[in-house]
Image: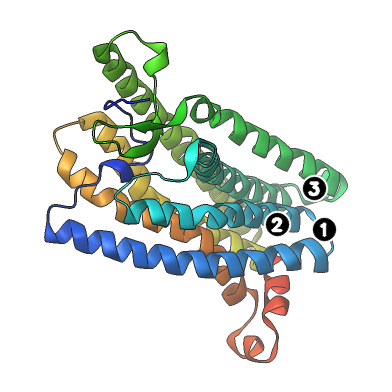
Amino acid sequence: MEVNISMPLNGSEVVVYDSTTSRVLWILSLVVLSITFVFGVLGNGLVIWVAGFQMAHTVTTICYLNLALSDFSFMATLPLHIISMVMRGKWVFGWFLCKLVHIIANINLFVSIFLITLIAMDRCICVLYPVWSQNHRTVSLARKVVVGAWIFALLLTFPHFLFLTTVKDARGDVYCICNFESWVATSDEHLKVSAIAATASGIISFIIGFSAPMSFIAICYGLMAAKICRRGFVNSSRPLRVLTTVAVSFFVCWFPFQLIMLLGNIFKNEALSIIHMLVNPANTLASFNSCLNPILYVFLGQEFRDRLIHSLSSSLERALRED
């Protein structure tokens, strides 16, 4: 199928390479993504092993285990993203992997923030209602809620499943994009539908996949802080430290990408070249978040001198364990 009208999926297909700055950012992104892949696969694989097979399953470990599963799945597909970047956005892996790889990337965004929000809510309930949480906070309930988060993330990525496909431009280059050609009659309608779909996707991703969950996390922290200050005690210090750092790292890594995508959909052609130049670095920073969590677990799990005498798996176990 030959079309030359498309809706870019994540910006990588339309990045410009005609300036020294854009080329430097492009090379830097490739290097960082390669490092992210190595550490992300090893780190999240170790978290899955420790939390899934060496620790008792609790509400906290189930959430962090699923977070690691989501990140590991995305890390496993990262080499295909890297190769596509090297080829200037071209896609040579076929129709099936076009859908699968990009759907996994989108699921990772939603599942990650949903799980972090669930952990924040769990911590908040433990602080505000300790007696209730002791009686009703069960592993069975946690599993059901986590499954619900995965299902909701799958539903949010369903439009990508429908419209993602491989298309060929006039030069014969193949790209993996959302294509609406079969749903419209003319090229003008295709452009209009593509623009509307891109805007809707960007807004949904920003609200449901970022701003609303981060706002809810902030509310949970406010409620916990008020309770702690009123009672004059600090509860669950280690799990709260881990959660705080994980939430902050998610915000720092994902906010630039979400903002660039949102601005790109709002302003369209006004700042197109600048936005396109920043897409790859922002996307790289967002991807880096998936390899950052295991590192945070290790450094927050125990004091420095303890880390020197304990194994890495022991450090992860202490980081993920409940008080």
Which amino acid type is shown beneath numbered disc 1? His
Where does label 2 land, which residue?
A: 65
Judge from the rendering whether residue 96 lies leftward or rightward of residue 119; answer left or right: left
Judge from the rendering whether residue 23 lies leftward or rightward of residue 47; answer left or right: left
**Quarter placement of the N terminus:** top left
Q: How far apart are the alpha carbons under marks 3 and 2?
A: 21 Å
Q: Residue at x 64, y 74 (%)?
A: 301
Q: Secondary structure at mark 2?
A: helix
Q: How far apart are the alpha carbons under marks 3 and 1?
A: 17 Å
Disc 1 residue crowd, few under 14, some 14–19, many 20+, Cα 10 Å: some
Q: Which dot marks residue 220?
A: none
Which amino acid type is shown beneath numbered disc 2? Leu
Which amino acid type is shown beneath numbered disc 3? Ser
The way the protein has been coloured in the rendering is rainbow
Residue 285 is situated, as x and y percent measured from the top left of the image, at 38, 58
Residue 267 is situated, as x and y percent measured from the top left of the image, at 20, 31
